[in-house]
Amino acid sequence: MAQHLDTHKGLHSEHGAVRGEHPGRSTNPVIKVRDLAWLEFEKPDLERAERFARAFGFTTVLRTEHELALRGTDAGSACVIIRRGPRSRFVGPAFAADDAADVKRLAAATGRPTSSLPEAIGGLVVELADPGGMPVRVVAGTRDLAELPAQQPHRFNFGRELVRINNTQRPPREPARIQRLGHVVLQRTRYRRSLDWYLDHLGLIVSDFLYYPGQRERGPTMSFIRGDRGATPTDHHTLALVLGPSDRYVHSAYQVCDLDAVAAGGEYLRENGFQRSWGIGRHIQGSQIFDYWRDPDGFLVEHFSDGDMFDNTLEPGWAPMTASGLAQWGPPVTKDFLGITPTKESLREMRSMMTAIRDDNEFDLTRLRGLLKVTRS
């Protein structure tokens, strides 16, 4: 058995766990998924969705009257599927299992049937529902799309290490080319129950826990969760869960090749009239260089590059959740990113706060005070 490392000082978080805290992994998960496969959305205007998607850096795989499939340059499946619907909403994620046997094992353990995916996608699927009622698909045997020509990272002269001579740097202002889907962040009113569900059923493991300042004894309120692929490094987080007053999508993130792709791609988006939410900066948990944008329907999406990659030996880190602690460098976190700019969505979230503290869930009055403290920190 691999030795688990607790190397948080100076690495990726402030502290490790103290005795009795959540271990960040299940002792006997049903299966261990390999990665996120794709995310599914519904939107009433597919034409508008595709215009933004192309400016953001996706390539269209499929376009019909009722469905839009978007991919990155890496080999694999489409990473976003958008179907026409009466309103804009996030439907749910699909996770990739290693093989059909894992899908069948998960189906048997949960009493759910398996079915074949459409011919264009191929493979087997079992559809579950997480504790928030959101559909969660687990798939295997899907058809891989061939790799596309990728945007190449730049070469840099650092100090006296010269690798670029008689050659200029002129990154064009054009869409960053999405390489792949990185992660999705979800808010849950029953955060702890949801966390344990994903660890127990899908074999995911926690990279970092965050807790409200002064409330560590009540347990974490956010977790950054990665796949367990043994000695093979994987993204710092494939899924992140955060406690909040409603069950909702927060954002999804897509990898691009380097900082120039993030920055020049952002300039292209800005010049074409799209709304930056927050960026450019570098996160603490995960270390990604980030840039957040709003699509025309208000959904938050992220370009990122240079994220942390962990194998399964690293133990979870623990740190207080603060607004100022979201980045190592970059502009101050915006009200838009925090969801406190007056919009229809933020007003809906405020109403949810009043409802949630009266309901039977984890978001009580003490947690509400903790969240408000975070937004002011």
Image (tube, rainbow, N blue to C red):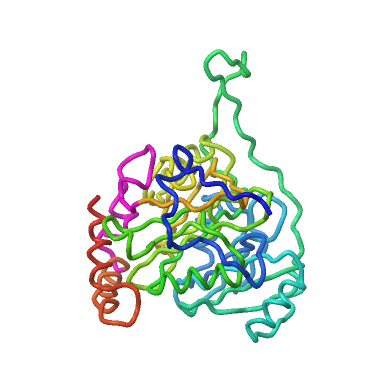
**26 in the magenta segment:** no
Quarter holding residue 168: top right
Residue 353 in the image, given as x and y percentages of width and height: 27, 72
Q: Going 34% across and 54% down the picture, which residue do you hit?
A: 337
Give the camera-side residue of 377 and 269.
377
Q: Going 43% across and 45% down the picture, which residue do you hit?
A: 13
Residue 41 in the image, given as x and y percentages of width and height: 53, 69
Quarter holding the N terminus is: bottom right
Indicate whether 54 appears above or below 114.
Answer: above
**326 in the magenta segment:** yes
Q: Going 61% across and 61% down the picture, which residue do you hit?
A: 36
Q: Magenta stretch: give its range.
A: 320-344
Indicate whether 166 appears above or below 201.
Answer: above
Residue 352 in the image, given as x and y percentages of width and height: 29, 75
Indicate whether 198 appears above or below 305.
Answer: below
Give the camera-side residue of 272 and 78.
78
Residue 14 in the image, given as x and y percentages of width and height: 40, 45
Quarter holding residue 363: bottom left
Give the camera-side residue of 59 and 136.
136
Give the camera-side residue of 158 and 70.
158
